[in-house]
Image (spheres, rainbow, N blue to C red):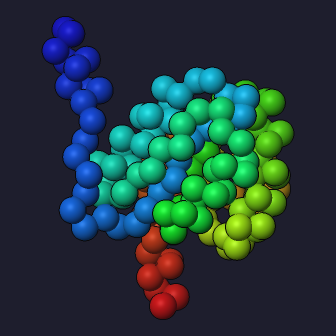
Amino acid sequence: MSWLKAMREKEPPEPVNPLGTVVIGTLHPEVMDTAKDMVRRSLKLAQFKTVDVGKGVSPEAFASKAREVNADIIVVSVLLTAAKENLPKLISAMELEGLKGKTVIIGGAAVTKEDADKIGALFGKTREDAVALAKKAIDQKRNKT
């Protein structure tokens, strides 16, 4: 069965013509990244360029990377309540970086749809939700232009 596990964990190739760029990570003090990695792989398979900022990242570093790579979407995995408390700081840091209005998607054990609504983010329970929300956000962005 180890070959099956290896196949499931295999890193998908970078998309040739990505639908958009996603910056993904976990906020400080989050130390778990398994869920984030599953979402990242799913987004990559769905043809999104993904930039992984890692785990336990400060809101300022997260926002800075999103600006640097001109991210279309910011995805945050939140498993700890302490990390959830940094979500408003992430939104503030994004505004300081000139990223107000960028799509933010949150998910994880420590957050709910109500938490997402409070900060103006989208909420997904599963990696499939994250992909669907990302595709919808890109479609809406394209329809505006």
- Left or right of 24? Residue 20 is left
Q: Position of residue 99 (x, y in %)?
A: 67, 70
Eyeballing the image, is 89 above or below 86? below
Query: Given the current orientation, which residue lies at the most extreme top position?
Result: 1
- Left or right of 103? Residue 18 is left
Query: Residue at 53% across / 28% down in the picture?
Result: 33
Eyeballing the image, is 56 above or below 115? above
Query: Given the current orientation, which residue lies at the most extreme bottom position?
Result: 145
Q: Position of residue 87 (x, y in %)?
A: 77, 47
Whether residue 110 is visible, yes or no, is no
Query: Residue at 37% across / 57% down in the picture?
Result: 49
- Name the quadrant containing residue 1: top left
Query: Residue at 48% across / 44% down in the picture?
Result: 52
Eyeballing the image, is 22 above or below 86? below
- Left or right of 33? Residue 78 is right
- Name the quadrant containing residue 94: bottom right
Q: Position of residue 109 (x, y in %)?
A: 66, 30
Q: Position of residue 43 (x, y in %)?
A: 39, 50
Query: Residue at 42% across / 43% down in the picture?
Result: 40
Eyeballing the image, is 69 above or below 53? below
